[in-house]
Image: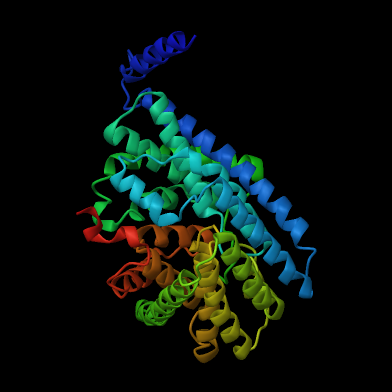
Amino acid sequence: MKLKRRRKLVTYLNILDQPIRFNPFVFSRKFILWAVLGLFGGIIASVYWIVLEFLTHQLAFFEGWLVIPTMATCGLLAGLIIHFIGDPGEIHLIVNNIRFNKGKLDPKNNPSMVMSSLLCIASGGSLGPEAPLVQVTGSTGTWLGKLFRLKGEALRSMSIAGMASGFTALFGAPLGGSLFSLEILHHKHAVEYYKAIIPAFVASSFSYIIFAIIVHLGIGPIWDLPSYEMQDKFDFGYAVFFAIAATGVGWLFIFCTKFFKSAFGKLQVPIYIKTTLGGIILGIIVFYLPITRYFGHHEISQLLVSDFSLQILVAILVFKIIAIAITVTSGWRGGFIIPLFFCGATLGLILHHFLPSISLSLTIVSCMAAINACVTRTPMSTTILLATLTGFTYFIPILFASLTGYFLAPRIPFIASQMEHSEN
């Protein structure tokens, strides 16, 4: 029976490699493979999001002081899952596998990643679903590529295309998601993986369609900023000025994360003790500042319509940075891109208190772009993602802010596997 299946697979692979007869277009049979991967990515992301929303609504009933035992319990359960099923790793492991493991992402880590991240995100951890989705959809690309006996760059391209389909489903930005999947690997290697850009675009487009149909998310801007029209030639200068301030906050986040990583690293205890301790600290922060709960998808909108005082905004920013750092370092699972956007939006509101004559939208978008580009080193995709997520149609100020954040970032990257010498 196995031999029969292998013969069929070889036959399908040969068909896939052959050009389509009487085809005057660039279109090839590989397009179908990329499209199928995108459909898989869209379905996986939709199921994940639906389960996440369900769990979030169930756990949202635990408010007030009850949030502390709730987050501690979810931290304990997530830690036990990681301890007994296996450690799925973090974003730097995904980057390392793409660059140095021939582009292979191992699907065996998926159950642990999915279950632990669902608990961490749904209970109110300051990490988002982008990292779990990228791990699962990227490894789906690896699995599909292996199924059709792809090797070398073709297999790596399938893994990257899978990652792109995961990013796109969440952000609703096929172009931004595709570029992010390449740029996160390190800007100097983006050209090296250029072969993956068309597979990534195709997979992202199909993933976007499926996710939008099933979940009805990602159509139009997610965060509704006041309308903006560029009327002043100094707007570029303002964008750079705000970006410098946001980059300072990015540095603060990086050092804060290193501090807590060192602190949790000194604890010679099993991971479920660390995740429980992390849950208790996060619960206490959320008890005093409820808006710091969750990863920021809905909270950014809440932040924009609320009339918080300057002192409260500063407290939200400081404790959100601490919350993200603790979530990252105590063993909780998830991604930090949208939480960083939340920090950028908060900083933008703070700066607007001092410079109310400058457009609020320009202030917020510049801060969001710079802090993310500083930490993740992805200026191109950050620009496109933010333009899509906020409806801010003027790309150039966002690009100026993103590049400022990127070039003023620490020499040692936050994502360790982006270091140049790591390939030696």
Q: Residue furthest front?
A: 268
- Residue 31 in sight here: no
The x and y percentages for residue 421 are 21, 60
The x and y percentages for residue 70 are 73, 65
Horizontal side, residue 304 vs residue 262: left or right: right
Tell me the quarter of the image containing the C terminus. bottom left
- Residue 191 in sight here: yes
Q: Residue furthest right?
A: 61
- Name the residue at 37% across, 80% down: 244
Horizontal side, residue 148 vs residue 167: left or right: left
Looking at this view, is 117 or 220 the one in front?
A: 117
- Name the residue at 57% across, 79% down: 319
In which quadrant of the rendered view does residue 407 lie?
bottom left
Looking at this view, is 3 or 361 the one in front?
A: 3
Looking at this view, is 371 or 266 the one in front?
A: 266
In which quadrant of the rendered view does residue 157 lie?
top left
The correct choice, above or below, for 284 with respect to 337 in the image is: below
Total labels: the figure holds 0
Looking at this view, is 96 or 302 the one in front?
A: 96
The correct choice, above or below, for 362 with respect to 378 in the image is: below
Horizontal side, residue 209 vs residue 157: left or right: right
- Name the residue at 50% across, 51% down: 87
The x and y percentages for residue 151 are 30, 30
The x and y percentages for residue 155 are 34, 34
- Name the residue at 70% across, 81% down: 288
The correct choice, above or below, for 287 with respect to 328 in the image is: below
